[in-house]
Image (spheres, rainbow, N blue to C red):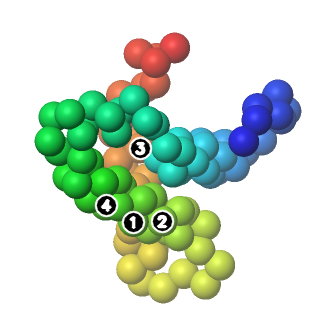
Amino acid sequence: MKDQNSVGKETPDIKYQRALDLFTESVYKPDSDLRGCAYNQDCFNELMEIREHVINYLSTLKATQMPHNPDESDILENEKLIQTKNNANPLSKWR
């Protein structure tokens, strides 16, 4: 995906969803250097296993962010996520 420049003002939920989509895309994108290192260090299969766990987690995270028909587990998961985000350190260390 190519960068499409600034998108203007959006809600925090939309921004979070966009960031989640970009991160998911980065996990799917093959990294031949990283995979080569894993192969050389004899942990390629483990790397791919961890990748699958992350992909599954990201799918779950995306499904719980904006459920159209939430059930009790969706609501609880969303509350946990909100609490985790509120307790997290600001992203200032990344900027």
> Mark 4 or 2, which is nearer the eye?
4
Residue at image mark 1: 56
Mark 1–mark 3 Cα distance, whole angstroms, equals: 20 Å
First along the sequence among labels 1 and 3: 1
**Is residue 50 shown left or right of residue 66?**
left
- Between the C-alphas of marks 2 and 1, the distance is 5 Å
Q: Residue at x 20, y 52 (%)?
A: 46
Give me the disc on residue 53: 4
| Pointer 2 residue | 59
Mark 3, residue position: 85
Neighbour tally class for label 1: few under 14, some 14-19, many 20 plus, Cα within 10 Å: few
Amino acid type at circle 2 is Ser
Asked if the residues shown at circle 1 and circle 4 are in contact, with their CB atoms under 8 angstroms apart, the answer is yes
Does residue 78 appear anywhere in the picture? Answer: no
Q: Is residue 95 above or below residue 17?
A: above
| Marking on residue 68 | none
